[in-house]
Image (cartoon, rainbow, N blue to C red):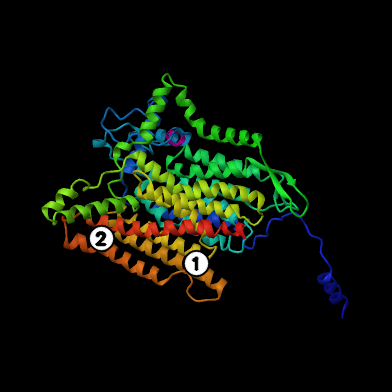
Amino acid sequence: LSRDARRSLVNLTSPQPFSMTLAPPAPQHSLSIKPVILTFLLLSSIKWLLIPTYRSTDFDVHRNWLAITHNLPLSEWYFDDVNGTTVHTLDSPPLFAFFEAFLSNNWMTASLLDSGRLDERCLRLLPDSDNDPSEACVKFHRATVILSDAVLFVGAYLATRSMSTLGETGCGRAPFFTFLLIVTNPGLLMLDHVHFQYNGMLLGVLLLSVAFMIRGASPSSSQRVENDGSMRDEGKQRHWEILGAATFASLLAMKHLYLVLAPLYFFYLLRRHCFVVAGSSGGRNDSQPVITFSWSRLLALATVTLVCFVGPFVPFLMQSDPVGQMQQIMKRLFPFGRGLVHDYWAANIWALYLFSGRVATFMIRKAPAHIRVLAEQIIPFPEPQPSFVALLLLLGLWPGGIDMAWKVGRWSLTKPLCNAGKFFVHAVVFCSLSGFMLGYHVHEKAIMTAIIPLTLLATNTRHTARLYIRTCLFGLIGLLPLLFRPDELLFKVVLYVAWMSGAIYGLEQIHHDRDGAGRTVLTKIDLISCVILSCVVIFMEVIHPIFMPGRLEFLPLMATSVLCSIGLAWCWSESCSQMIYGSVKVAWR
């Protein structure tokens, strides 16, 4: 044998020293910043072309919020309704109100007003009967949404990169493809850049928080495996968890839609962050880790979280009537008088409940008289009260947001095989779906809170890819009725079909390369679902407007909501299963 061959043989047969330090896994795929910037510029150009398209009354809502924060003192922000002439009152938490104040009072806006490029009427308090904006005003508002999407790109970039630190083969695979699925999602294009909202920015903040939480749970050189198998942490990665909690607290101060994720953050961080492994008990072979509670970590975590969440409320508490200010803010944030559902039913459990009530009411008309007398005591179905809905929502959040969050927080300290970061992403998806399916007066846009984090898991396994495709398939089609004008029909259908086709093709290629098999993502039931949804879209957009004009106007919306709610209930159940058995079961081995 040659000298090099003998040296290689010796290296292979010689015993190697065992290292008790978990080194961070070398990422097999990386995402550089240059394609991210190019993608942002390209998509921003496309979004600019959408400026003349349809805009909903949400545009008037945000225009009025700019006017409120531009013309009125802070003490009147949550009280003003332009003398009762507008319904577009401020109903977002204080931090988002300060964001609107920044947009209406910065030096760039002042420069546009002084130069005449932006008319003063755009930032004037106007009644609903006379609030038509100018073309310059529309461009200004659209531009703020386009620029705010930079937060989405930063969040998607960091979250996608953080997935490669979890130490599993599938996590972080094809990062640029995952990044593209997030930033090109047709739901965000339709909601933000046609319908008009700021969902991309808010979801970007959520992705930032998730990225920090993943970093805090990923194996690194700051963690060691002790002789008893427990995890000892040197403290460096705990800063990531504090940063993730602070980011989420700021998100709550911007949009209370994300309140459904609060139990997950609370119980997960309380068990994982505030407990430390102090040592072991017993001998070397049967030693058990000793876990103690750290009051200093709880104090640090609570201080940072409260400052980020309560801080935006402080200026309102410093007004002459702080109690009245808080009562008015709570009244605006939680308007239970609007009813259980929105005018267009979101595709959740309550859509099925109301549909069942309609069917029961119709059928009881054909029943004999004595049966009608008995049935009229419960038909039509009573509307659930907010307290009952809140209790049901809490039960829906229990599996992932409370029970498993607490258990995984403990297992991550005692079992090195527990992938806490992967569980956390699964739990965010599950809790978001729970809030969408069970929440009170849920809007259809809330499904994006589950779809965007779920994108991070799409390339992991065939099962997560199927869950992602199914959730997008049913969730995004529920957004199509928001663009109801014939002018946007071709745009929304082509956008939905093209993006879904690209997502399916890309995931098929990723998992085909891994498994060496044929089709691995779409199953027969998925193909059947595609056919059924296609028939619903054709009926909603072609058959009903042409052959049934002016009759049963609510039928297309009801059919879409009911069908999508059945599909999303299926995805909700599958999400719970994958959260428990896909990311946690490894801790039981």
Q: Does the rendering let one see residue 310?
A: yes
Bounds of the magenta segment:
95-104
Residue annotated with mark 1: 507
Within-10-Å neighbours for mark 2: few <14, some 14–19, many 20+: some
Front position in the image: 412 or 507: 412
Describe residue 220's horizontal placement relative to residue 535 as left or right: right
The quarter of the rendered structure image containing the C terminus is: bottom right
Residue 568 picture location, percent across and down: 38, 57
The residue under the point 56% across, 57% down is: 583
Residue annotated with mark 2: 540
| SS at circle 1 | helix
The quarter of the rendered structure image containing the N terminus is: bottom right
Magenta residue check for 534? no
The residue under the point 12% across, 55% down is: 368
Residue 452 picture location, percent across and down: 47, 54
Front position in the image: 259 or 544: 259
What label does residue 330 carry, if any? none
Front position in the image: 351 or 288: 288
Gap in angstroms between the C-alphas marked 1 and 2: 29 Å
Within-10-Å neighbours for mark 1: few <14, some 14–19, many 20+: many
| SS at circle 2 | helix
Front position in the image: 422 or 491: 422
Q: Earlier in the sequence, mark 1 or mark 2?
A: 1
Q: Amino acid at mark 2?
A: Met
Asked which quadrant contains residue 75, the reply is: top left
